[in-house]
Amino acid sequence: MSKKKKVTIVFDIGKTNKKFFLFDKNYKEVVREYTELPLTTDEDGYPTEDLVALQNWIKDNFNAILDDENFEVKAINFSTYGASFVHLDQKGNVLTPLYNYTKPIEEEILDLFYEKHGSKLKIARETASPQAGMLNSGLQLFWLKYKHPEVFKKIRYSLHLPQYLSYLFTGICVSEFTSIGCHTNLWDYDKADYHDWVYEEEIDHMLPPIVPTSASINTSYRNQKMKIGVGIHDSSSALLPYILSKKEPFLLLSTGTWSISLNPFNDESLTDEDIENNCLNYMRIDGKRVKASRFFMGNEYKIQVEKLCAHYGKEYGYHREVKFDQDLYLRLMKHKAVYFRFEGIILKRKMISATDLNSFSTFEEAYHQLMIELMDLQIHTIKNAIGNSEIQNIYIDGGFTDNDVFMKLMSHHFHHYNVMSTHSPLGSALGASMVISNKKIDETFLQQHYQMKVLQPLIFNL
């Protein structure tokens, strides 16, 4: 009989894609499954994650691996999106839907919160959380207390989603730093404790004991001993392989729907200006802060590219083939101006009443202009995240690493830095498997797993 392969299971739960991974002891991917689960609605008819469907999918995948003669499961962990609570009663039953973090909160409840606990800016600065309703998951508890007091009274524990998935396997309720620290309004970074409002509203006793993110609980299923991790917030998880393998300070630019600049080497407190520039803190697994600044780049890019395709009569997807054109770029930079009206980005920039595409004779020209205008905001957010920290290295991952114009502009504007593109389809899943392993990794780890490429700075023939 052949020897079973020892594996770690990771459930990596995004808003859209639910992913299931098996990793071997060297963090090599052995199995990967993707699925999209249909949404359900909450009591107000607002679309939200179907918790029962998610649990069933997890259970089915887990049982299938236990039944598989080829594998021996040694550990399980969970990385998921943040700002989402599951509320349990005394018996461990789920009390409410998993409310969607985009669900609006009534103005009168928000007004009551700021009236009782301090201005929007004060709360945002102290909790390092730009104010954004349900996306600040602590506000969800406040909302439940004043909107659904009868439900609120029944809550024994509120678990962030990664910790709830861990609880399904262990029956043990815990909190951990990366989930508490991601724009939740719960954590006072300067005090290194829950914010005063959490105690004043008597919400602290509904938040289970805090354990390290690397904690695990030993258990056995069908006579197989395994350890169950306590879960990790996906942004902190995606950062972890870099932190564990790199000694010198770096900034990670994570690109996708959001473009997020993550600086784990900046522990300055956020200023009012930072908050106005959409800066926030995430938390490392040891509770230290990560300064982050973000903007809705991928979302805006998609909106504008659809318009370009319609205007120039191109199929959507044509933009993916556009390569950086130096002559075109230099010509546009000679008469630099704002031509695009952005729709989903709130960062300060010159506002114009409508996008002007008539100034550009080709799709390529308009596309270069769009990338120049997005890059102006990208430069601003990266500099915000770097602050006064000594950084020489910038790693870029996510969807925009395939965008030739974006990557060339990054190498041009940040030519004083080592700019590297990294490509890992594993992202946050890899961090979740690493955090519960005691295995040390070295400098070569990213080279092996992330297809790293150093970008050459552009030398313009001016």
Image: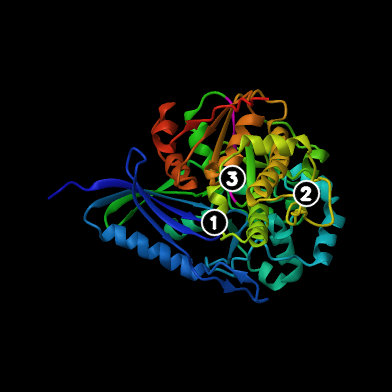
| Residue of label 1 | 317
| Residue of label 3 | 255
**Which numbered marker is on residue 339?**
2
Disc 3 crowd rating (10 Å Cα; few below 14, some 14-19, many 20+) is many
Residue found at the very far left of the displayed protein:
1
Label 1 sits on a secondary structure element that is loop
Instruction: Name the residue at 56% across, 61% down.
Output: 315
Q: Is residue 309 magenta?
A: no
Report the amino acid beneath label 3: Thr
Instruction: Name the residue at 44% across, 26% down.
Output: 443
Judge depth for marks 3 and 1 and give the one in front: 1
Q: Is residue 19 left or right of residue 103?
A: left
Report the amino acid beneath label 2: Tyr
Specify whether residue 233 is in view. no
User: Mostly what secondary structure, the magenta segment?
Assistant: strand
The answer for how far apart the CA atoms under marks 3 and 2 are is: 23 Å
Residue 198: image location, x then y, percent = 73, 52
**In the rendered image of this protein, does residue 206 appear above or below residue 55?**
above
Residue 36: image location, x then y, percent = 47, 65
N-term mark: 2 or 1: 1
Disc 1 crowd rating (10 Å Cα; few below 14, some 14-19, many 20+) is few
Q: Is residue 162 left or right of residue 439?
A: right
| Quarter of the image where one finds residue 403 | top right
Screen quadrant of the C terminus:
top right
Label 3 sits on a secondary structure element that is strand
Colour pattern of the rendering: rainbow
Instruction: Name the residue at 66% across, 44% down.
Output: 368
Query: Which span is picked out in magenta?
Result: 249-256
